Amino acid sequence: MPQRFFSSIDFLSDCFPSLFTHIPTIFLDSLFPVRTTKYCPTPVGTVFGQAINWPNLVYPCLFGLLIGCFGFYECFTFNLVQRSPTSSKAPSHFSLACLFFAVMNVSAFCTHCYFTPQSFTWQIMYAIDMCATSTSSIYLLLSTLTNVPKIITKLSYIYFPVTFYVLWTFEIQGKQLYWIPEFLYIGVTGFAAGVLFWKVMVKELIAGDYLMYLLPALNGLAMFIAAAPADAMLCDLLGNPYGNLLTPAFVGCDLAFGGLIGYVIAKDDDAFDEKIMRIKRKQKEV
């Protein structure tokens, strides 16, 4: 059986040690009061006869894997259809964001649910989780830009292995607190989410376009942001295994990414249809 965390606060201390050691105790006590340790300790369940921690993450991680694979396949094949023989054969930035989102969900399940915390295999999955999340965010950020220099795209291909090496060597094996997980997961992802919100969501929401996709994405973002502050309330309302910060955090990620994928596919389809209409109009003029 995997070793139990004591509660959500212990989950945070393992995943973001530098941040945890610098948060004032009074603030931690208000977010994660003592009663949550008593009433909502880390839930343990069984899946196919295997004991796991945080069984509430099984379905969100599975759906996240499916959402990421679907987004990668749909966006990659759509780009294939639109390519000319001389165009690049590389997948789009957004399709790669979806691919690493799928990787993130697999590694997150292994990290939080399956392997014993701080074991060697846990450390590997933890590093993959942090770096895959950050890599997905980098590709989301690049997907909001136009005319990305080829050198930037080529450098993005080595982002995952380089960040994995840095995290593994200096933070995990070096046993030093360099704020590397916090930078990769919170810093990069937060910055990418902010740019995406400002450059895409605000513009489309003001225009009233693609609301059926962007509103779920916006709700997912709000759920993720509210996850930690809502931990104690969720414990009081739902108890185990769903009354903790991980439930809204993971479900929120799935909602946000699913909404973005729907938005990108719908927008690409509209752009493709408009392109076909322009070609037909030109043919009629001739």
Image (cartoon, grey):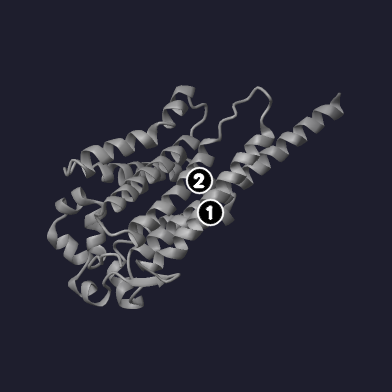
Say above or below: 126 vs 30: above
Name the spot of residue 209 as percent of width and height, x first.
59, 49
Q: Quadrant of residue 251?
A: bottom left
Q: What number of labels is visible?
A: 2
Which amino acid lies under the numbered mark 2 shown in the image of this protein? Cys
Mark 1 or 2, nearer chain start: 1
Would you say 183 lies left or right of 48 here? left
Q: Which of the labelled discs sits on residue 252, or is there none?
A: none
Q: Residues within 10 Å of mark 2 (few under 14, many from 20)?
A: many
Tell me, yes or no, whether the two marked residues, 1 and 2, touch with CB atoms within 8 Å: yes
Q: Which quadrant holds the N terminus?
A: bottom left
Residue drawn at 21 percent across, 56 percent down:
13
Would you say 155 lies left or right of 69 here? left
Name the spot of residue 255 as percent of width and height, x first.
49, 57
Query: Between residues 35 and 91, which one lies in front from this camera angle?
Result: 91
Name the spot of residue 85 as percent of width and height, x first.
68, 24
Residue denoted by label 1: 67
Q: Could you say whether the residue bearing mark 2 is in a helix, strand or loop?
A: helix
Residue denoted by label 2: 98
C-alpha gap between disc 1 and disc 2: 8 Å
